[in-house]
Image: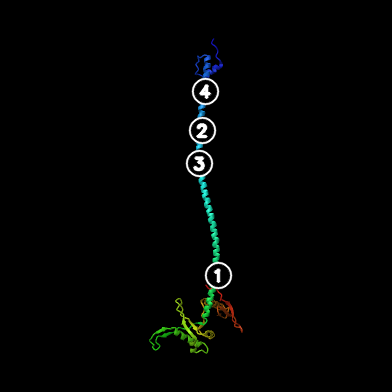
Amino acid sequence: MPPKKDASSSRKQATKPFVAAATTTGEEEEINQLVSEITSESDTINKSVFEDIIKKYIKQCENNLKGLIKSENASLKAEIMRNQQEIETLKNENNNLKKQAEMNKTNIESLKGETASLKSKLAKCEEGQASLAEEIEERTNRQLRKTLVFRGIPEQSIRKDPTSDDSGMRKENWADTEEVLAKAIADTCDNTTLADARGMIERAHRSSPNPRYTGSGPRPIFVAFYDWKSSEYVKRQFRFNATDIRCDNKYGPRTSARRDMAMKERKRLKDNGSILNGYVDFPARLMVRDSNAQGAKYYMKKDFSKEMIN
């Protein structure tokens, strides 16, 4: 009767088909032990190789990551350096701008002071100029106090040859103007002969033709008298004796402009019925009368003597 096989040996034999069935129990144990050793060694070798591969891969990854980190760090450092340089440049520019702004502020303050000083000087100059203009105007009026202006005396057409009717006509010259004026004075003033009138006149002439004048009235006559009393007498006679000829003093340009303002105001007041009559007293005072009652007198309505003239 053959010997019985061990149960464990049967299982080993069943799980390891490459063991020959004809081997003995001792040989089988030896073979299984050997196979077990070989399998264990193989597993150990494979595990070691795999671990080496993993370690090499991890090492390679670490090296790659370190290289990448190093490269990125170098790039970041370079970028930081560039940014720091730009910041320093901007700081310098900002400091320069601040300095420039301070300089501009100082210059502006200085210019403000100079402007204020110039304005003050200009105001003083304008004040001095206005004062000088008024002084010149006053002297001009004094120099013209014997000079009168006559308006409304017709201009004469004179024969070139008084002895011939066919000699043609000419415009009056200064001598003709003096004669026409002397006749007008003699005709208007009381107790004044033509010879007396001629003796009062130092010189006389009409104004130059004005190309902008489109009217047909005669040019005014400017007359310098030898004596101030004679000029005042003639002026009063023409003012109070009814005549179409108007007579007034010759004034400087500023006084003339102010008297013109007063005359315009006189006309306005007469047109709206505020006054009955009025005249302009020297230098430019508007005198009016607004009542016909007995004892009603002229009074000053407005003084144009200090009106600003450009």
Which callout, 2 or 3, points at the residue further toward the start of the chain? 2
Q: Residue at x 53, y 80 (%)?
A: 142
Amino acid type, mark 2: Lys
Where residue 112 sits, quadrant-wise, is bottom right
Badge 2 marks a residue whose secondary structure is helix
Of labels 3 and 4, earlier in sequence is 4
Residue sitting farthest toward the top: 1
Q: Amino acid at mark 4?
A: Glu
Cβ atoms at labels 1 and 2 below 8 Å apart = no
Residue drawn at 51 percent across, 33 percent down: 59
Q: Tag 2 or tag 1, which sits nearer the N-term?
A: 2
Q: Quadrant of the image for the N terminus? A: top right
Of pointers 2 and 4, the one earlier in the residue sequence:
4
Q: Measured along the vertical axis of the image, is residue 57 above or below residue 255?
A: above
CA gap, disc 1 and disc 2: 95 Å
Q: In this figure, which residue is indicated by the disc labeled 1?
A: 124
Q: CA distance from mark 2 to mark 4?
A: 26 Å
Pointers 3 and 1 in contact (C-beta within 8 Å)? no
User: Mark 1, mark 4: which one is toward the viewer?
Assistant: 1
Q: CA distance from mark 2 to mark 3?
A: 22 Å
Q: Look at 54% across and 72% down and name the residue there.
A: 128
Q: Which callout, 1 or 2, points to the residue nearer the camera?
A: 1
In the picture, the disc for residue 41 is: 4
Name the residue beneath numbered marker 3: 74
Q: Which residue in the structure is indicated by mark 2?
A: 59
Q: Amino acid at mark 1?
A: Lys
Identify the element where label 1 is drawn.
helix
On the image, the x and y values in percent for residue 17 come to: 50, 19
Binning the other alpha carbons within 10 Å of mark 3 as few (below 14), some (14 to 19) or many (20 upward) gives few
